[in-house]
Amino acid sequence: MAAAIARGWAGQWEGMLFFDPDSERARSLAGELGGEAVGSNAELAERADVVLVAVKPGALQRAAGELAGARSVVSILGATPLEDVQAAFPDAEVGRVMPNVAVEVGGGVLCIAGEFGSEVREKLNALGFVVELPDSQFDVATAVMACSPAYFALVAEALTDAGVDAGLDRDLAEKLVVEAAAGTGSLMRIRRPADLRVSVTSPGGSTEAGLDALNREGVRGAFAAAVRASLERMRG
């Protein structure tokens, strides 16, 4: 996810610095985006105005020790409350962000909590739709908006496969599905999903028949189960 954020910021935030224990990965991303790979977290903390922390939750304390002296910290650690990150960085301005992968193209959703300077808020806004939430709601928000791009992609895969089975060329079927999804996403920004569904569903028509089949197969229950499973894993 840190790489997706960096790609979303490319050209907007000059002089990005990168560190990863896998130095080749840091060099590769820096080369791709015109930044600089540094040799340690300590160097990162010394030189960066804002440090984006993207480690496994269990590595927070070690990373915090290496990043001692950081002035402003943005955490994208999953299932890690804001207060835990604040405790790890007691002398820094600390904010928590949970984005989804579409930040890479400036169309993401970002849930935020904590302290953010005006420059950081501006840069977060450039990544997509930003909503401030109580830290206690982050897990549920994550299950709904951060996991859902994978679910949407699975729907697109399934529709593409169905189109191929019905006789379409695979590349054409995938293009039709992807463009339909993109347009529908834009439309749902101005129309409620339920209203849009009803408007497309003519009584006795082919869309109604398809929705009836989806309901028989338990599609709503499947998505509800996916959210529950994600929450259980985060809270496990």
Image (cartoon, grey):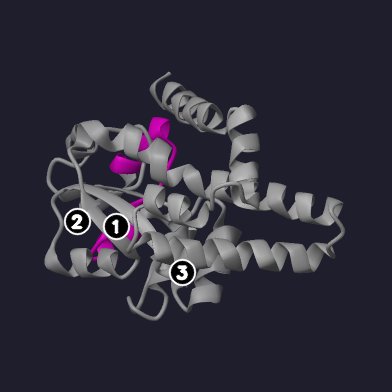
Number of callouts: 3
Q: What amino acid is at disc 2?
A: Ser
Mark before the other along the chain sequence, 1 or 2: 1
In-front residue for pair 113/37: 113
Q: What amino acid is at disc 3?
A: Val
Spot occupied by residue 25 in the image (x, y as percentages of width and height): 58, 59
Q: What element carries label 3?
A: helix
Q: What stretch is highlighted in magenta?
A: 43-65
Q: Which residue position holds label 2?
A: 72
Spot occupied by residue 133 in the image (x, y as percentages of width and height): 20, 43
**Residue at image point 57% right, 52% down:** 22
Q: Which residue position holds label 3?
A: 105
Spot occupied by residue 23 in the image (x, y as percentages of width and height): 55, 58
Q: What amino acid is at disc 1?
A: Val
* CA gap, disc 1 and disc 2: 6 Å
- Residue furthest to the top in view is 236
Q: What element carries label 2?
A: strand
- The C terminus is located in which quarter? top left
* Badge 1 vs badge 2, beta-carbon distance below 8 Å: yes
Spot occupied by residue 123 in the image (x, y as percentages of width and height): 27, 69
Mark before the other along the chain sequence, 3 or 1: 1
Q: Which residue position holds label 1?
A: 51
117 left or right of 3? left
Q: Report if residue 173 is visible in the image.
A: yes
In-front residue for pair 124/75: 124
